[in-house]
Image (cartoon, helix red, strand yellow):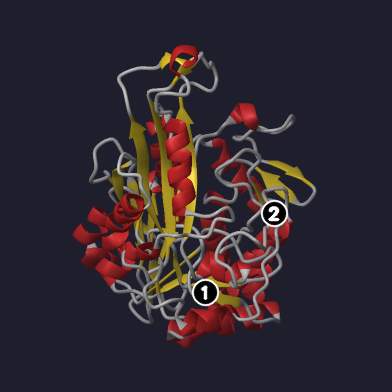
Amino acid sequence: MSREGAIARALGGFDDGGFKRLLTELVAIRSTSQDPGHEADLQQYLEQAIRPWLERLGFTVQLHENPRAGLGPILTAERMEGNGPTVLTYGHGDTVRGLADQWREGLDPWVLTEEDGRWYGRGSADNKGQHAINLHALEAVLAERGGKLGFNVKMVLETAEERGSLGLREFVAAHSAMLAADVLIASDGPRVASDIATISTGTRGTYHFDLVVDVRPGGVHSGNWGGMTTDPAIVLAHAIAAIADRHGRILVPGWLPPGGMPASVREALAGLELRAEGEAAQINPEWGEPGFTAAEKVYGWTSFIVLAMVSGRPENPVNAVAPNARAHCQLRYTVDSDTTKFEQAVRAHLDAAGFPEVMVQNAGIRMPASRTDPTNPWVRRAVASLEKTLGRKPQVIPNSGGGLPGDVFIDHLGVPLVWIPHSYNGCKQHGPNEHLLLAPAREGIAAFAGLWWDLGEAA
């Protein structure tokens, strides 16, 4: 009965194909929350795939309806031994759309396929593979300790994360006593690089809004009217250019952290060099805030993205000056920003730039930002444990670039956040050909087996 034995058990279950068989079954459940008609799949994932597994590990499991009608259910589970700290872990069993027609030949989003050190499949990285890694490691520690952990574990597994975790805040608020814990330790999102173990203590938030130019009831003949009537697409393009320059630098002061980047954030990111991996995208050093490193741009600053824009019908254009133009925009922001001023700031900026006809509509936060101090004792414990297992110190970042509902757990449970991701930025989550790299996955299983063991030892 030893730490090394627990890690060896976890790795053995990975190397003998057991974990792959498990993930194959999880990926095969078409539990997308973004397409209608998959409500039964969301229920199946929790009821038939996760619940029996947790009950075999000694958890008491409950399934709950989402507080918001029409959204997927929420699973809670607890395994209480009475002594030691209580750890809350989290995951989501829903995925984005399958997008089967966009995957390359030979791949199916709902069939786990191994190629070149990768497991392809929808949810393999986001998030089925990640919470399965943590439970697999927990199972190994339980076996090594003869059915004991030495601490208490609670779990929340939702099925509406890909719809903004709608309903989760109300659920956690209503069940705060049941979910009370000392820390949240969970996995989602990417490492800073595939070969660099990472601990994130929060996430950036997402703020969405539409920019709309609507000048007439319908289109007018481009020959008879072109050149003398307003083209809304041109107006909208110039308005966007007034918001961000040619290289993506934000020109709206009210969107940026009023005190600049905190010194603690700069210190945490000092020396961290990001690199593009896989085929997802390339880092453009000229894009974004001048003078910032790529890590500072993604983990410490606000970014402005035009997610979609349209005028007329690009798939079937006609010879007409369109009546309107619309862009759906997003801000990724850190906790250092004042979100109450976002809409007011862009409205004032557009007016000052000469675009009073550009309307700001449907503005609001989709997922709030969150952050735990990277020097928190729980973070330090996780760092020490991962370093002991992996033989190198993990990279700590104050928040990841993407969004997660960490704010819900901070606001209603008061827990520090320790996110330990098992994926990487080239995994193509949310797009076709999503995959989980085998090397970080195997390393993640070892790291969590060591972490779960150390929590029991400390208790």
**Residue at position x 64%, y 71% from top?**
197
User: Can see residue 163?
Assistant: yes
Secondary structure found at label 1: helix
Front residue (pair 209, 16): 209
Measured as percent of width and height from the top left, residue 309 is found at 47, 35
Quadrant location, the C terminus: bottom left
| Amino acid tagged 1 | Trp
Alpha carbon distance from label 2 to label 1: 36 Å
Q: Earlier in the sequence, mark 2 or mark 1?
A: 2
Front residue (pair 202, 439): 202
Q: Where is 72 relative to 77, above or below?
A: above
Q: Nearer the viewer, mark 2 or mark 1?
A: 2
Q: Where is 291 relative to 403, above or below?
A: below
Q: Quadrant of residue 177?
A: bottom left
Front residue (pair 388, 423): 423
User: Can see residue 61?
Assistant: no
Measured as percent of width and height from the top left, residue 242 is found at 45, 51
Task: Confirm or deny contact between disc 2 and disc 1 (CB under 8 A).
Answer: no
Report which residue position mark 1 lands on: 452
Report which residue position mark 2 lands on: 282
Secondary structure found at label 2: loop
Q: Where is 260 relative to 348, above or below?
A: below
